[in-house]
Amino acid sequence: MPLHEDIIGTGDYLLPIDYLHLLVTFSALRGVTANELLEGSGILVEQLIQNPAHVRIDSFNQAIDNLIDLDSDPLLPFEFGLLLSKQSHGPLGLAGQSSGNLREYFEVLQSYIASRTGYTLEIPTRSQGAFFRISVVVTPPNASAAVIKFHVISNLVSIAWIVRMLTQGQSDKFEEVIQLVWPAPDIRVPDHLVPAGASLLFHQEDNLLQYKLAHMRTALKSRNTTTQKVALEQCDALMAFPPAGAGITEQIVWVFQRTYPELPTIRQVSHHLNISPATLKRRLNAVGTTFQELKNHERFSRVTRMLKCSNLPLSKIAHDSGYSDASNLVKAFRAYVGQTPAQYRNAHKGG
């Protein structure tokens, strides 16, 4: 084994190693050792000690699965979300806290989240009537239902806490709402795990954090245009190229996420990677796959994410994934996955 590896674990998506270190610390506080946490993840504790730059997402998610298996406390994601809110989050955190107001903060978060998550998460936002809504979408298609639930809840809770910290003294009456598609846990979520005055609603159509639109004008006391400019330049630099050491399939996944929601052609992907289409095909052939296979995988990954992470009607999912209607999506999905979307949702929605 080399003395130092910049990337450890398995999977097509890369996540900064900071978050695995945080998970190890969180687990240790709950009596789960690093060896127990990393079992079956393809990562040795010795590799983690070498402090690599990134961890591959399948290994990170396996660690979360292990934690959930070893500690069945339904409050785990709420507690991890509180811990997550206290981290610096690199240039993204600095750019966000330097924003002029909450609306600008969420614009930064949505546009630059990939500088910290490597496209393993998306944070879409939207205004709807008198409300402003923030969602969390888990990108890796093979994440288990339990892992998706952990990521979604912990990140929504974390964002709610960060907003309170950024607007201290001004947000006592925000009355934000955290909506989750899952049933309420068997035990009550303690008040200290969510901001005071926030509402938790379960069995909802979608996972989201909701504020009154008027609150988006709330100024941040930490606003600083000079600091934000420097931080955003660092975020741009982090997102400009795939992480060093990424393989050809990881680089293509990076382009797919970089161009979301569009699915680019092979020529467009080649342009992003600064290689010719012929070279791209040759490199893919060397690892036993084709561009069309990766593109199909990405298309249906987006559909399965919506099926697993929301209660959106099939007509809406079909529209958002580029199909003319639900029947065309059903036909294509059955041919690719071997199940209808309804069968897939029923099989994977739990957790």
Image: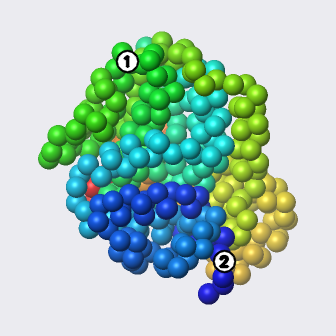
Depth order, front residue of 73/112: 73
Res. 124 visible in picture: yes
Position of 10 compared to 71: left or right?
A: right
Percent across and percent down for residue 320 are: 51, 40
Position of 334 compared to 104: left or right?
A: left
Q: Count the marks.
A: 2
- Circle 2 is placed at which residue position? 4
Identify the residue at horizontal 38%, vertical 57% (top origin).
26
* First along the sequence among labels 2 and 1: 2
From the image, which quarter does the N terminus lie in? bottom right
Image vertical order of residue 45 relative to residue 325, above or below: below
- Circle 1 is placed at which residue position? 172
| Mark 2–mark 1 distance (CA, rounded to whole Å) | 47 Å
Depth order, front residue of 271/203: 203
Q: Amino acid at mark 2?
A: His
Depth order, front residue of 202/225: 225
Q: Amino acid at mark 1?
A: Asp
